[in-house]
Image (tube, coloured by chain):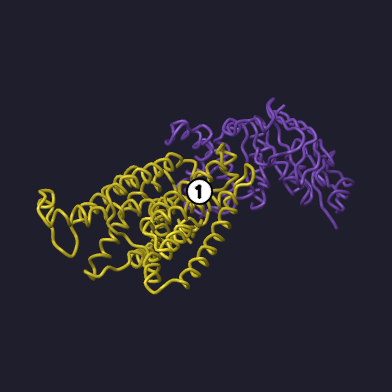
Chain colours: A purple, B yellow
Amino acid sequence: MTFIAKQLGFAYGLHEASFEFPRNGLITIAGPNGAGKSTLLGILAGLRSPYHGSCVFAGKELRQWPKREFARRVAFLPQSVRMEFPFTVEEVVLMGRTPYASGWFQTAEDRSASEEAMTTTDTLAFRGRDFRTLSGGEAQRVILASALTQRPEALLLDEPATHLDLRHQLSLHRLLGELSKSLLVVAVTHDLNLALRFSDRVMVLEDGRIAGDGMPADVLNPALIARVFGVQATVHGSWMTYEA
Amino acid sequence: MSRSVLLSAAVLLAVLIAAPLAGSSHIELGRAFAGVSPDHEIFFYARLPRVILALLGGAALSVTGVLFQCMLRDPLAEPYTLGVSSGASVGAVIAICLGWRATGLASLVGAALVLLMVLGMAVEGRRLSSFTLLLTGVTMNSMAFAVILFLHNLASFSQSFAISRWLMGGLEAVEYSTLAWLAVVVVGVSAMVMAWAPHWNLLAVGDDWAASRGVSTVRLTAMGYIAGSVLTGLVTSLTGPIGFVGLIVPHALRLKLGADHRVLLPCAFLLGGAFLVVCDTLSRTVIAPTEIPVGVLTALCGGPFFLWLLKSRRRSLWL
């Protein structure tokens, strides 16, 4: 097990959630606005404290993990990054190596880890560009590359597909599926079709509580979708359409 | 990377050699070192201390500018944004109104009080957000400005003149002992800030971005605020507020060198120092024997240069 949460809650957004996450696989967290998805992801990333209840990663309660050590095992991708300063793509990617850094200068290992991550995410071509000149899709891939240089066991993503066009949504999810063979990938999303198609498990939140958790095809049924999201869903094989 | 730092050091060195020789009366270096009057006195007691003060002041303000812009993720932040220098000004104005001679000491006390007040307001439990720092600092500035206006209103004619002179900022020759402890603090605090350069890079992107990569953001933000405030408070107590240096030098350097704080901070120290030395030299030579307030020159020299930089970089979508 990676994460084990028992009656996990937070001052706002999340009331009570208990679950266990395995070592690998792609887990999607879905739910309407304000259901507590991002709060839950923030707690798992070690960014929201103090939380109620218990949340254990690799046998140790989250609040007891030293930050640096935790950052070598769990990586977090924000929904977007608002960059004010002219960092290059490569500099942004290399920032992921901070939890391994022992001083001021990058090591050969840092550089090979970032090359590898940029190759995986197909961002090597614009390594020298100012991050602020990238398109939304390019920026998203660079942020993913930065997280991969942390060499994490768990990758937490907050709505990674929001700024992407259809083609990039598909290629991102294919990449996440590929990565999830060897590590745990947890992604918050609003797109139930992507969840249905790519994830190994779906967790639906409603008002800070878990409304459904299990295989995508079982959880995302018309009855649950009507109750939680308030829309009528029709399933066509592995695809859904909605009506108000 | 190290090339830009070396180049900056070379520029500073050249400026440091040229600046004390420039002035309304011609002096020779050989005669100054041989102890021949008046070259000796002009060089060692009038010009050199002032050049050193300008160097340390410019370095401290530029490093603080880089730091505050990074911490607040606000390109318009400068050393005076977070209130410490207005605390220094209130201290100095009170001293002038009460007829105390220790204006510098009073402004130091004012700066320290504001530092403690802002920290006390912005820290809640173990949290510290740069946003609260910004709001508290800006409020302190407004309050300090109101106090200064009030005191200025009550002041006599000669006090009023002294207050305006102080608020304009300016460099004067100070004792070598003062310069020595100023140098120790400015170099020491700047070195400490530079030691954390890789972490400033992450904080410049965002709090969560840095925290999820193992950076203790609260500790780093608190350290940055205290370091910047100590630098600004000390320098302001000796020179008064000198505008523009801490805003323009960091931006000009970012345009040329990028955002990596491992390059940016050392270059800001070196070239910020050089910039203020040049401005101060101009301020005492251009219409000698009358001096132009150095704040006027930092804006007049820095402004057009910066606009030119901005225009030459517009193609690459900087703004």
Q: Residue furthest right?
A: A223
Number of other residues with Cα within 10 Å of mark 1, as a class: few under 14, some 14 to 19, many 20 or more: many
Any part of residue B318 in sight: no
Quarter occupied by the N terminus of chain B = top left
Q: Nearer the viewer, residue B125 or B204?
A: B125
Q: Nearer the viewer, residue A235 or B177?
A: B177
Q: In this view, does A166 lie to the left or right of A207?
A: left
The residue lying at 39 percent from left, 74 percent from top is B157
Type of amino acid at the residue the image marks with label 1: Tyr
Quarter of the view holding residue B137: bottom right
Q: Which residue lies furthest to the top in this view?
A: A59
**SS for dot 1:** helix
Above or below, A30 relative to B287: above
For mark 1, what is the residue? Answer: B225
The answer for which chain carries disc 1 is B
Q: In this view, does B125 lie to the left or right of B311?
A: right
Above or below, B109 relative to A205: below
Q: In this view, does B176 lie to the left or right of B268?
A: left
Residue A66 location (% of width, % of height): 60, 31
Residue B35 location (% of width, % of height): 11, 50
